[in-house]
Amino acid sequence: MLFDLKPKEHREELFDREEEYEELKRLVDSGLWVAVVGKRMTGKTSLLKTFANENNGIYVNLLGARSIEGLVRKLAAESGFKLDEVSLDLRFIQVKWSRVLEDVFARIKNRVIALDEVQEVSSHYFLKVLKSVWDKYRGVKIVFSGSYVGILRRLLEPSPASPLYGRKPAKLLLKPFSRELSKKFLENGFRENPRVKVRSEEIEEAVDRLNGYVGWLTYYGNFRCVRRLSHEEALRETVNEGSKIILEELENFLKGRRRELYVKTLRTVSNGARWSEVKKTLNANSKVVKIVLETLCSAMIVEEKEGYYWIEDPIIKEAVRRMK
């Protein structure tokens, strides 16, 4: 069902991602590792879960796994391996957990491993393990996804000192739906629910408000068809629920960063602002402004064109408005 809030797991459930699926398969079959990138709510998790499921792979959601130990435990659990042989009552240093991680990769051998929400994993030792896996276990095929910060950015933009320099994954970009495709998605979803009567102008307004992000369109359709809310109520609840999700993500993103500067910047660019306006609002030197804006753009929270910055996702806009 198109309006099911759970990520899709079968190819026939994906809506208009056939081209992306085929490209992902082509890249993986050619022996490359792949990073699936894109804005929030564009269907990255559904593509990863489906690809892993259809190709005898292993899907691992690493949300909250900041350490190598956390990654090892999640990967081992999803792979069906036990860590009984490891003395877990000791506080192992990162290097030792790196060895355990490499061992888990070695046992998996000739399978696709889809690592989702990889951005929070501590990068230094992880990159070393990935280099070793790349060099020793060519049958291991890894697909990464997550926000374009942290480890994912280091994978795709490796410095000469990086263990993966010269070994960066191929990049597959998922874009939001076009206006016409968004309308088609909603129309097809409502056809699966013939008892719910919907007017064409309601679909038009939903597309206008939710702007091609399949995750938010799915929320709207679910509120209409499953919870039987009116058009106005469904839009309102989509914005409310979506804002809560994005607020939590933004708070996680801001940890370890200069929160006040980032929040001010987000509010300034919410409806569009030039670089000079941001600098004036922050009252900071050019280097600081550059770092803040580049970080927000790299994380795909903010858009930029010719020195003009704005937030495209309407739910992120609302979440920024609600930030304290």
Image (cartoon, rainbow, N blue to C red):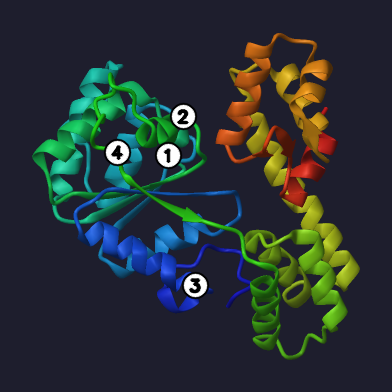
Q: Which residue is mark 3?
A: 14
Q: Residue at x 18, y 49 (%)?
A: 140
For disc 2, the neighbor class at 10 Å (few under 14, some 14 to 19, many from 20) is: some
Sequence-earlier tag: 2 or 3 = 3
Numbered mark located on residue 118 in the image: 1
Q: Are marks 2 and 1 in contact (CB under 8 Å)?
A: yes
- List the single residue furthest toward the front: 306
Q: Given the image, on which type of amino acid does mark 4 rest?
A: Lys
- Per the model, the C-alpha gap separating discs 4 and 3 is 28 Å
For label 4, the SS is loop
Q: Nearer the viewer, mark 4 or mark 3?
A: 4
Q: Earlier in the sequence, mark 4 or mark 3?
A: 3
Indicate the quadrant where residue 178 lies.
bottom right
Name of the residue lying farthest toward the left: 136
Q: Which of the 4 quarters of the picture holds residue 193?
A: bottom right
Upstream in sequence: badge 2 or badge 4: 2
**Element under label 1?**
helix
Say which mark, if any, is on residue 168: 4
From the viewer's perspective, tell me whether residue 154 is left or right of residue 131. right
Q: For the residue labelled by badge 3, is the local secondary structure a helix, a strand or a loop?
A: loop
